[in-house]
Image: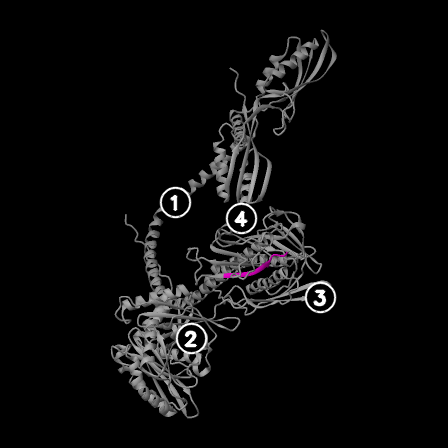
Amino acid sequence: MMRRPPPRPTLRKGYTLIELVMASSLTALAIVPALALMRDSITNGSSIDTQNTIATFCVSKLEEHLALAAATFTEANTTGTFAREGYAELNYKVQSSTSAKAGGIPDQLMAISVTVWNDADNDAQQDADEKSLTLATKLAKMERYEGVAEVVTASAMMAALMTSGVVLLRTSQGVWEAHQEDHARLEAGQKLVRHIVRRVRQAEAVVAVSDASNVYGNLTLLMPDGKTYAWAQTGNLVMYGADTASNVLAQNIDTLRFIAFEADGTTITTDPANAQSIQCIVTVTLPRGSGELRVIRSHAWRRIGQWSALRNTIDYERATYLAGAGVYHCLAELENDPSWRTGVSKIEFPPGSGGIYAAEVSEVENGTVIVTGTGAAGEVVRRLQVTVEVTYASLHACISEQRPGGELQVSTESVTWRNASVSLDSDTGLQEITAAFKQLASSLKLYNQTVQISLSGDFCVTRVVTGKSDEVRQQLHELEERSSSYFLLGHGPKTFGRCIREVDAKQQHALLSIVNQRVLTRVMDAANRAGMKVDVVEPSIVGSCRLLGFLGGDVDEPALVIQVGQRTVELGVCHRGQLLLDYRPSGHDAKTSVAEIVARHLGRLQRYCDRYVKFSSGNISRVYLIGENQTVLNLSERFKEQTELQATVLDREYCLQHSDLQLDAASPETMTAVGSCIRPRMPGPQQLTPNMLERVQLYSRDPLFPALARAFWPAAAALLVAIGTWMVALYEYRDCCVLESRLEEFEPQLQQSHLLRLQLIDRRTRIEHLMAIDSALEKTPWHSITRTIGQCLPNDVWLQSLIVDREKRITITGAALTEDGVFELVSHLRKYPTVERVALQGTEVGRFRAGPVTQFSIQCEVREADSLGALESRVLAQEQVLASLENKAVNTDDTYEFREQLVELAREAGCRLRRLDLGHVERRSWEKGDDPLEPVTGEKQDLITQFELTTQPVRLAVAGPMESVADFLNRIQESDKMIHTTTVTMRAAPGSSEDVELEMELLIFNLSKKPQAV
């Protein structure tokens, strides 16, 4: 038999490989940038969610500690996390102090500061690059002015609004919509909490508040204008309105709870008249994934007076608390002196934050005092001017910050970077200077901060050109062409920076600084790796001249500035902050003989200034020294001995005497960095500097290949995937054609198998239906019933009829010679197990052939026969009920397990178990209808059972936060044991403002059989 060859595979019309590759490439080029934009938008959205969450928790903690401080006025420094709310990565730090250093007044005014930050590295320490928020306010200890009315005007300044642009792509619509839904629900919950908290703070009184256990809570507040506002939850909607909650405020809210606290901030109350603070708890379910549950909670302390409502920003919160600090500052002063009316103005709090508060005190008629507070949020971002001077072996950092009062706060820090490296232009040198930059960034919190670099004379050379405009340009051009010849700066290409200042219509003054490009690149790389952004690189001698001009040391006549480094000495002539000449003495003993060199060349320097620098006048009579402290002191003595010049060391004392700079303990060697740092404060011409970074930024271009690789690697990846997919599809298509040809041979068998399978299904279905009918039919043993009834008939009794109706009721009629025979028949039927409810319906006298008879009618019902399986099921059900009840009882003979359960419940709730005592076990007989809580008055023999009741008292005491104690009580209730609570006592824990103590007396019960008498 010849086999038929397999059919030839049918070729389907499709796209060519070139078309597929081009389509994949174009799709990748379009989708990848769009996906990157969507990814960035999602990241920004998550960042905004984190910042909103931080703000919510920060407000909650500050309100909570305001309530505690108002009740107890005790200092506290606490830290912790929000792990219980589901945000273990968020840490907080609370500082409450009445010390003057913190901004308070001892025993009168308390400064409260709360900081919440996102602990990304999980080290419980706040780092500079971690998102954080600090809110601070003050609270006065009011004894004299308890009824004072506050009228607070809070103004938020420099509000920053962040806008995130988003792109919705059809290819990733599901991911984007999921993110949007999560963001919308979380934002709705946060806005709801903030709205309620702010309204509570403005409220005059609490009219109604729901119980703390009510997850669909409601709240009604009386506002200062006399109107009442209500909040209530209906389903997943939160309603809000005047008098009644009739308008939708928020959607998709799972639960809304309100917990009212008394004035001490810890005692929960249900009386609206005693409610001083309200805790609002909102839960929402995120739709993405498995439905993650988020809890948002916040405290709100109801103020005594009235607060003005402002816009919904974080700056509003900051300004509001600062305005309150101003009011309470005045109240504290009034406590000490009732006649005080001075007020406070422009006080920065906390120091260094930029926030300012002020307050005025005025008196109206009848002795009423009005305190008006104003708060300015200030800027959240630190506005600093940072300079890092790079010397041969050290880094000198200087930070200047403008204070609200106008003074300039300057701080310095130095680190050594060179340890084992011979040159900065080496891998070891790069590693060492990078480590030093990172150390400065960590200690001074300079991450993502713009800095200015100042290079000492070890790394750059500065040339000065003065003259007519065309001459200056020509000389600068010649210097630029010769810049590659400065071999002292090292091998390799050189770069330069220049600046030109107009002296008058014809004269110009120019500076040109030259540096090795590889050295500059190394310094830039080190700063970038430390997270700093460099915008200016200038020579250090320019900064020294700028500082001298700022201090007024060269206003009347030119002066000499000498920088003494680790290896070199750099001498500059300056006038009014401008560098006129840069000169470097040569020789290995230049540091020790610089006084002799200056004395030898002083006349030449003076002639240079008179001839070339027309705008300077006067003789050089002073020299200023900058460098290591002991070195410059020695040089100062040499200048006094060998020259007639007045030598002065530029140090901290000199700066404090001649300027308003607020310097910390700065050494003379850091003065150059200070001069570079004050550049923004100088007049316009003195801000000019030869920025050696401009030329690098102008001519530097990113390599083309990495940019092309970033742009085209998605297309290449898509191309490889397309080719691989096409090859796999071709291989699978050929195999599929072969299998289809083989499948045709088994077509008859498949049809017969399918027919048999249908028949089998039909038989099974018919069997199931017939079994259902058979099981539904009742099989009453009528033959047994009729035979037994006949056997039960006495000799003088005979039957006339036996009728069974639809309800299986049997009616028996007959006659008996005597009535005793009838009752005997009824007695026999009642003993028969197949019938029940046997009743004699009636008797009457009748006549029969043999004489008078008693006719009767008996009615009974057929008993449903229980099968063995049914009885076993009923017994099993009763055993399950019994086991459930016995599990609730507590075995008083072995209480070790019960003690362990209580200890474990306290540990899980976060409480500390102070005491756990079990009393004496009492036993008594258990009677029918007995009450386990009532004492026994006397045993009734007819009610006594075979069981006895055992009771045992338990006394326990726990301590912990209010939330943990409430959780412990809830866990005891959920344990579902036979426990009766007799007494409960709760009070504040001694020595702690946040913990409470709970004492309880319980009774545990058990029921057991009485022991058998021997």
- Measure the alpha-carbon separation of dots 2 and 3: 51 Å
Q: Which residue is mark 3?
A: 364
Badge 4 amino acid: Ser
Q: Check disc 3: other Cα within 10 Å, few if <14, some if 14-19, many if 20+.
A: few
Observer able to see residue 649 = yes
Q: Which residue is mark 1?
A: 750
Residue 444 in which image quadrant: bottom left
Specify the segment rendered in magenta.
133-142
Secondary-structure class at tag 2: helix
- Measure the alpha-carbon separation of dots 3 and 4: 42 Å
N-terminal of the two: label 4 or label 1? Answer: 1
Q: Which residue is mark 2?
A: 654
Q: Which residue is mark 4?
A: 992
Give the foreground label among 2 and 1. 2
Secondary structure mostly taken by the magenta-highlighted segment of the chain: strand
Q: Position of residue 509 (x, y in %)?
A: 39, 87
